[in-house]
Image (cartoon, coloured by chain):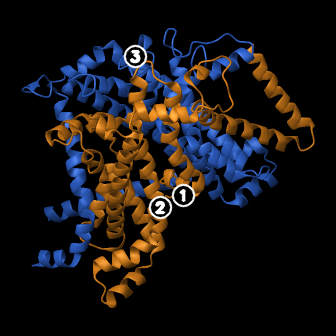
Amino acid sequence: MILPVILLVIAALVLIAKFVPKGKTIVLYAVLIMIAFIMIFPFYDMFVMSTRTTQEIFSFPPLLVFGQNLVENFKNMTDQVDFWLAFRNSMIITCSYVALVLLFCSIGGYAFAFYNFPGRNVLFAILLGTMMIPTTAGIIPWYIMMSKFHWVDTFRALIIPNCANAFGIYWMRQYCKNNIPTSLIEAARIDGCSEWTIFFRIVAPILAPAYASLGIMNFVNVWNDFMQPMMILKSPKLQTLPLMLRTMVSDRGTDYGAMMLASTCAVLPLLIAFLCASKYFMDGLTAGAVKE
Amino acid sequence: MGLKKTWKEYKVAYVYIAPFFILFAIFGLFPIAFGFYLSFFRWDGLSAMHFIGVENYLNVFKDPLFWKALKNTLFIGIIAHIPILLGGLTLAYILNSKLVRGQNIFKTIYFMPMVTSSVAISIVFQQMFGNNYGVINWFVTLLGGEKVNWLGGDGALIKVAVIVMFAWKWIGWNMVIYLAGMQGINNDVYEAARIDGANNFQVLFKICIPLLKPIIIFTIVQSTIGMFNLFTEPFILTGQNWQGGINNGGLTLMTYLLSKAPQGGNLYGYASSVAYIITALIVIISIAVNRGTLDKKDPDYLADQAVRKQRKERAKALRMAKKGGAVK
């Protein structure tokens, strides 16, 4: 029964494209809007379910308009888990990681772009080589190392090891080469600026768009990461948002409305930021593909 | 003396690049090297390590669960690549054509899944794929079908749910990359093709895809790595089961690895060998994708080969000359 319906729809679309004037455009819009609907629907359903009681969520056919249980769900959620603590933990980890990675990547990329130090080409080749190694190979010893360092159950373990970001350095180097004229740096040097001043006063401001893209890319990845925090953060006080969601799921007989609201709260900040600055997000998250 | 002078002159540069190399040596290189070493030992993380040669690897290959995990991962990855490649290309092509407007709106909507937390979205999909109350089954019954037990039953259909989530998440990413690539192609190329009488399909398959090949390969390699690291979605969908749920239907390689150590058990040596097998698979597939799509008639490839040949001959001639000099 499903297959004939789908075939019928496709046949109708083809016919429209062939015989209706401007049919092609109509069909293309139909396809685009249909897929857009599929992309949005899970978000919409999540928002709807977070305003419903558990009983309403478990009803058939499913209710697809907003309910009135939002406040109640919020109360239940904050009773079950410490949402603001998890939010704060996620914020601390992500922000300190992003700040460090941006600093290391930009100074590294700048050094590779503008200093002709001995061994530069070899070191840069090594840096590119490290991007080819899948990190999966070291995951077990990495964990052993963290426990030997007594870094299990600390934020450090999620921040410091990940700061070695070869791609970021490579990307910053390209950006420096394409956007900063050598003469600018030489002029500053002649004027008597120290090397640090040159970087922080002259280079860093020019790098602002690169900081935005690279920062967003790393922010999104770390904010949403589940596997590493799951391995490292054991105590409830250190939970990040994904870990908090996981605890809510594993508590049996859970309140589904509250759970959906928690999911919404975990997704919403980034989603709103994305809708406001989608260009930077797309540039950052697809970096490396086109900028060769 | 020379060294000291160099150091003084370029101290800043070395200081600037030092953080990466130090951190990478400690937290990147060392674990990878130690993991290889560890994969030849039996170790529970506390007592002494026992060298057992390749026994870990043999045991992995003997374990039916490993094969099940590999089969699941490959199945999910290969099926999911069809919509994300073809769908991504088609959507990019539609948006790139002059026929539709609102490119940015559609791009933004398709890209949305990429910025969301896998755990949160898995929870939502779990609800949507639910047997009795899920939206998807409701849709199926609307079309006159029977309710399908996606997440229960014999555990095979859970892969469908994972594939849908994987495709839902990655299609926008691929699309945005392809679209950027298509916009980078010079407009004259399209116009020339149109004047020669090429239709839309010919332009897509004969011009766009060959010109985008490096980008397409990049996306395939990236999503292949994503596929082998697939863990969160099936883990949440199966109710956080380390065995992959009913009949191990949702067991992926990454879940299998973590279930051995450090999450589900303490077989550190064994888990290391699993990690190395996964790595080998990633490397092999990446190379195969690069090699398999190699076009022997491509002018770039031919030029590359010619340069290489020339270099080889020159080196040979140099060696001969040196040898001759030595004899004399």
Label 2: how many Cα within 10 Å (few below 14, some 14–19, many 20+):
some
Q: Which residue is mark 1?
A: A280
Q: B269 or A153, which is in the foreground? A: A153
Q: At numbered mark 1, what does the secondary structure look like: helix, strand or loop? A: helix
Tag nearer the camera, 3 or 1: 1
In the picture, the disc for residue A212 is: 2
Return the x and y of residue A141 as percentages of the image width and height: 21, 36
Q: B135 or B180, which is in the foreground? A: B135
Q: Amino acid at mark 2?
A: Ala
Is A98 positioned to the left or the right of B135 in the image? left
- The residue positioned 43% from the left and 51% from the top of the image is A219
Quarter of the picture holding the N terminus of chain A: top right
Q: Which residue is mark 3?
A: B68
Say whether marks 1 and 2 touch (CB < 8 Å): yes
Q: Amino acid at mark 1?
A: Tyr
Chain bearing tag 3 is B
